[in-house]
Amino acid sequence: MTCQKATGVAKAMQERFRDRLNLKIHTINSPEATAYPLKGATNIFVGQEWVSLDVATSREKMEEYLTEILADAG
């Protein structure tokens, strides 16, 4: 359930931020995941930064987080 919720929030954020966000979804056994010491099945990263599930599963918190991150990026 957490994975589905986080995926839904991620897709909503891709729609919200459009060209400012490049969404990629990988499974835990994907080659991209091997570089990280992942402990759970659901892990969210923005760039190289891990995002807590509390933020990643909340549209409001994730939008606030991304707004701040993208503003800092210029």
Image (spheres, grey):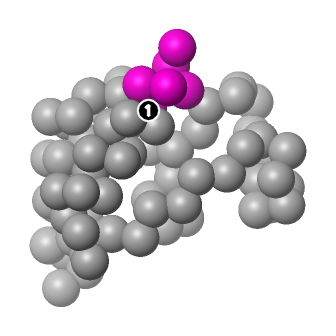
**Disc 1 target residue:** 6
| Direction from residue 34 to residue 54 in the image, left or right | left
State the image coordinates of residue 23 (x, y, percent, origin top left).
Answer: 45, 62
Q: Is residue 46 visible?
A: yes
Q: Residue at x 52, y 44 (%)?
A: 44
Q: SS class of the residue under badge 1? A: helix
Q: Residue at x 14, y 73 (%)?
A: 71
Q: Nearer the viewer, residue 16 or 38?
A: 16
| Direction from residue 42 to residue 27 in the image, left or right | right
Q: Is residue 34 above or below residue 37?
A: below
* Residue 56 in which image quadrant: top left
In the rendered image, which quarter contains the C terminus?
A: bottom left
Most extreme residue toward the top, as rendered? 1
| Direction from residue 32 to residue 45 in the image, left or right | left
Residue type of the residue flagged with mark 1:
Ala
User: Is residue 31 part of the magenta span, yes or no?
Assistant: no
| Direction from residue 15 to residue 23 in the image, left or right | right
Prevailing secondary structure of the magenta residues: helix
The magenta stretch is 1-6
Q: Nearer the viewer, residue 49 or 59?
A: 59
State the image coordinates of residue 60 (x, y, percent, origin top left).
Answer: 15, 34
Most extreme residue toward the bottom, as rendered? 74
Q: Is residue 49 visible?
A: no
